[in-house]
């Protein structure tokens, strides 16, 4: 699910506004986990990310964070 936006170099989303989507491969697991938890709680604002994060259990979030932390950083 994440790779559809966060795995495309230079990808820009247009909802709710135009913005650059960050690559998450190689980011520290704790950073990814904290970001997803913040979206889930509503502390970080983005409708799509809130919806996605809200659908994940705490274990799902930890697993996603661990997976993407092990991926190569983009060039």
Image: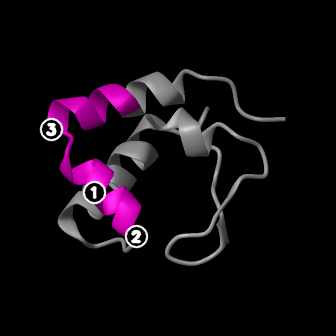
Q: Nearer the viewer, mark 1 or mark 3?
A: 1
Residue 72's place in the image compared with 7, above or below, is above
Mark 1 Cα within 10 Å, few/some/many (few <14, many 20+)?
few
Residue 11 part of the magenta segment: no
For the residues bearing labels 1 and 3, Cβ distance under 8 angstroms: no
Image location (x, y in percent) of residue 43:
28, 73
Span of residues in magenta? 47-64
- The structure residue drawn at horizontal position 34% and vertical position 44%, both measured from the top left corner, is 33
- The structure residue drawn at horizontal position 57% and vertical position 78%, both measured from the top left corner, is 17
Residue 57 - label: 3
- The structure residue drawn at horizontal position 65% and vertical position 45%, both measured from the top left corner, is 23
Q: Nearer the viewer, mark 2 or mark 3?
A: 2
Real-space Cα distance between discs 1 and 2?
9 Å
Query: For residue 24, which quarter of the picture?
Result: top right
Residue 73 - label: none
Real-space Cα distance between discs 2 and 3?
18 Å
Residue 46 - label: 2
Image location (x, y in percent) of residue 15:
52, 70
Image location (x, y in percent) of residue 4:
56, 38
Residue 51 - label: 1
Residue 72's place in the image compared with 48, above or below, is above
Nearer-N-terminus badge (1/3): 1
């Amino acid at each position: 699910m994440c790779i559809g936006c966060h795995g495309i170099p230079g990808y820009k989303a247009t909802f709710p506004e135009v913005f650059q989507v960050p690559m998450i491969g190689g980011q520290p697991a704790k950073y990814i986990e904290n970001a997803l938890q913040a979206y889930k709680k509503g502390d970080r604002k983005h409708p799509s990310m809130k919806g996605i994060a809200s659908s994940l259990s705490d274990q799902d979030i930890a697993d996603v964070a661990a997976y993407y932390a092990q991926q190569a950083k983009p060039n």
